[in-house]
Amino acid sequence: MAMDIETAEAVETLRSDIHQVDRSLTAEIYRVETSLTAEIGRVETSLTAEIGRVESSLTARIDGVESSLTAQITTLTTEIGRVEASLSTQVGDTRRHMDVVAESLRDDIRMIAEGVVALTAKVDSLPR
């Protein structure tokens, strides 16, 4: 079936319009893709920089806490050493004191024993 000229011209115009819209949409899609690619690149760069800043900040804070804890551990170690030395001295002093007390008690017990022996001898010498 043959088309009349008017219909053929309308079909050709429609084809031309469709091709023009196709080229226009293709160009617009390319422009949007390029724009989005650039924006994604900027966001990626920005996020990478922010992550780097956060990492540096956290590393500095961790280093600060580590230094503080190390200083506190050193202080505690020194204090423990001082307390151990003091306790060692006190234990030695207490041991010497207890040796003196024990010797004194031995003397007291010896004197009491001698008194009991003397008293026993007196009691035994009494008439019954």
Image (spheres, rainbow, N blue to C red):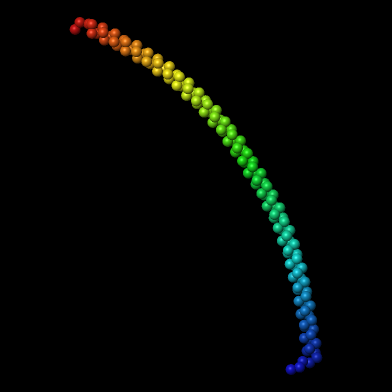
Q: Is residue 70 left or right of residue 46?
A: left
Rendered view: 116 above or below 70: above
The N terminus lies in quadrant: bottom right
Residue 42: x %, y % from top left: 73, 58
Residue 128: x %, y % from top left: 19, 7
Corner quadrant of residue 48:
bottom right
Rendered view: 127 above or below 36: above
Query: Which residue appears at 70% of the width and 58% of the height?
Result: 44
Corner quadrant of residue 47:
bottom right
Query: Which residue appears at 72% of the width and 61% of the height?
Result: 40
Residue 32: x %, y % from top left: 75, 67
Rendered view: 37 above or below 103: below
Furthest-left residue in this view: 128
Corner quadrant of residue 72:
top right
Query: Which residue appears at 54% of the width and 29% of the height?
Result: 81
Total tally of numbered discs in the picture: 0
Furthest-bottom residue in this view: 1
Residue 93: x %, y % from top left: 48, 21
Query: Which residue appears at 24% of the width and 8% of the height?
Result: 123
Q: Nearer the viewer, residue 7 or 116?
A: 116
Rendered view: 16 above or below 71: below
